[in-house]
Image (cartoon, grey):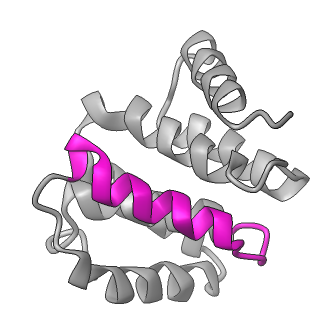
């Protein structure tokens, strides 16, 4: 999948997949969170779920390469309008928090996303707090 064929919806989904895969342990709860976002959020209206297997393979292939994460972020920035950068980060935080714990590798991935999308630190903190609040357990 190239920048020419990656849509904004693909970019959002790819980022969620990358966050889930970042710790090399894709949890069922993370997959459920990704599917729930794709099936229920207005930003994914009209998204063709048939694209997911190819998109997932693209993300995995890129993460296996030396500079693959950098290439993935390039594709995401090219396909995603800047007005959706905070949405992308919110979706990423939700996937990272879906299993109840954000590990060191996922934390580094979220830091990288903040940097790559040039998110304001205060806005990012608010997004992170919202994700934490949504995923609290008793």
Query: What residue do we see at 30% from left, 50% from top?
Result: 40
Residue lying at 72% horizontally and 30% vertically, measured from the top left: 132
Tell whether position 26 is magenta: yes
Q: In this view, does 138 lie to the left or right of 48?
A: right
Q: Which residue corresponds to the image point at 39% horizontal and 52% vertical from the top-left?
A: 37
Q: Quadrant of the N terminus?
A: bottom left
Q: Give the range drawn in magenta.
A: 22-44
Q: In this view, does 119 lie above or below 93?
A: above
Q: Which of 30 and 89 lies nearest the eye of the viewer? A: 30
The residue sitting at 83% across, 58% down in the picture is: 105
- Residue 24, how many percent across, how many down? 77, 77
Above or below, 133 against 10 in this view is above
Q: Does the magenta stretch include residue 137?
A: no
Q: Quadrant for the C terminus, please.
A: top right
In the figure, is residue 124 to the left or right of 101? left
The location of residue 115, given as percent across then percent down, is 60, 36
Q: Where is residue 27 in the image (x, y as percent from the top left)?
A: 71, 72
């Amino acid at each position: 999948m190239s920048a020419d064929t990656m849509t904004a919806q693909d970019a959002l989904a790819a980022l969620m997949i990358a966050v889930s895969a970042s710790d090399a342990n894709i949890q069922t709860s993370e997959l459920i969170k990704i599917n729930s976002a794709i099936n229920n959020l207005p930003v994914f209206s009209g998204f063709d779920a048939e694209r997911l297997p190819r998109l997932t393979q693209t993300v995995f292939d890129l993460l296996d390469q030396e500079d693959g994460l950098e290439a993935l972020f390039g594709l995401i920035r090219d396909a995603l309008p800047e007005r959706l950068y905070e949405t992308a980060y919110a979706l990423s935080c939700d996937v990272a928090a879906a299993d109840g714990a954000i590990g060191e590798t996922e934390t580094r991935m979220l830091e990288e996303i903040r940097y790559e999308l040039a998110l304001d630190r205060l806005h990012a903190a608010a997004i992170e707090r919202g994700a934490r609040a949504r995923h609290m357990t008793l």
